[in-house]
Amino acid sequence: MTSENKKLGMSTRSVHAGEIRYNEYGAITTPIVQSSTFIFKDKEEIRRLADGDFERFEYGRYGHPTQVAAERKLAALEEAEDAVLFSSGMSAITTSLFAILEAGDHVIITDDAYKRTLDFCKTCLGRFNIESTVVKMCDYRAIEAAIKPNTRIFFSESPTNPYLNIMDIERLMGIFRHRDILVISDSTFATPYNQKPLEYGVDLVVHSATKYLGGHNDLLSGVVLGKKELTEPIREYLKITGGVIDPNSSYLLIRGLKTFELRMQRHNENGQIVAEYLENHPKVNRVYYPGLPNHPHHAVAVKQFKGFGGVVTFELEGSIEAVLEFLGNLEIISVGPSLGGVESLITHPATVSYYHNTPQERLELGIKDGLIRLAVGVENARDIIEDINQALAKAL
Ligand SMILES: Cc1ncc(COP(=O)(O)O)c(C=O)c1O
């Protein structure tokens, strides 16, 4: 089963797509082909490779069977022609950008993209004479004004971290559709369950598959999806840069994806319930969740999303110490970075992601001391709420 079967329901695709129905052993699961090299059976096979028949596996860095099964499943879910897997989301982003860009090119990136992606554009690309302009997310005029004759890529993330700003992709593509600029969207927070940027004409979608796609906080991976003519050069470049996903993580990804639709439905449900609860909590100053009518991009989310996701950001009144006290009191939700897994995770940007920044820099970046990002898992919403409630009651 391949991505051609897009008429099938999402759960059917997530269970079956990419898998060989009757594999060599009759095993219902796709085997973890734990091998770094693939040997030749006989001289005919050696000759075939020499003659240019590359439809066989050769060496793990160039691709392996478990990776291919996972890639086909992801392509089927995103309804993309092709998917290329990597050892992490950052590997997917950096390899893709390096594969496309040349010295003298210009990149536009939105200001609240993932911190490391911004770092890469601002510092690493500059060393190769590739200039980056950082524009305000959702400022469509500024985005258009930033375009130069040598602009090669527009890169944005949507929804963003931690404020869950959402790009109106239709409006964005009104700017880029007729220009020779590749539009790349990091859709990690939305996943192909909630949003399909390719349907709007976005050229490439990337995900940190570490998050909702893997879904169990047990693997690192990234993926880039789109038309083969765009993904093939990236796949070739990956063979040089080497950030290939290993067979075991490929299998964990396949395994995690089987429940993708079920998990996403629960993440969406839980996100909404917890956001509504926090909105009415007297110790919470403000909640940022696209499913709430007061979110600045609620209307875009309603138009563009199937669900609003599992990440809820909120502001507590109080000092950093009081916030840390609250985090320390939690009994079910774990404190740690990342999101998209079955376990609820909470993080405090001021002391975790932005601890190197001065208080003034944090304020300029909009990272207030009381800001909290909660990645709601698939536990019972009532238990998550009770956990928050008891932790707040003791801390603030
Ligand atoms: C939106 C987004 N993109 C990319 C990444 C990088 O992914 P990875 O950690 O798998 O390298 C992250 C990581 O948190 C992320 O949140």
Image (cartoon, rainbow, N blue to C red):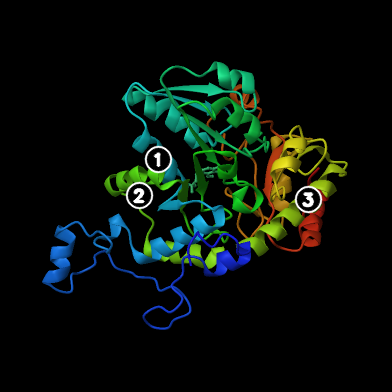
Q: Secondary structure at mark 3?
A: helix
Crowding near the residue tagged with mark 2, few <14, some 14–19, many ≥20 C-alpha atoms within 10 Å: many
Question: For the residue marked with disc 2, what is the amino acid?
Answer: Gly
Whether the residues at callouts 1 and 3 have beta carbons within 8 Å, the answer is no
What separation in Å lies between label 2 and label 1 (alpha carbons)?
11 Å
Q: Is residue 74 above or below residue 38?
A: above
Question: For the residue marked with disc 1, what is the amino acid?
Answer: Ser
Estimate the x, y position of residue 354 in percent, counting from the top left.
57, 34
Q: Name the mark on residue 96.
A: 1
Instruction: Please report the residue visible at 24 percent of the width from the left and 62 percent of the height from the top.
Output: 58
Q: Residue beneath label 2, please?
A: 243
Instruction: Please report the residue visible at 59 percent of the width from the left and 44 percent of the height from the top.
Output: 199
Which of these two is toward me, 317 or 46?
Answer: 46
Instruction: Please report the residue visible at 20 percent of the width from the left and 69 percent of the height from the top.
Output: 39
Q: Residue beneath label 3, please?
A: 272
First-in-chain label (2 vs 3): 2
| Ligand 1 within 8 Å of the CB at mark 1 | no
Rendered image quadrant of residue 365: top right
Rendered image quadrant of residue 323: top right
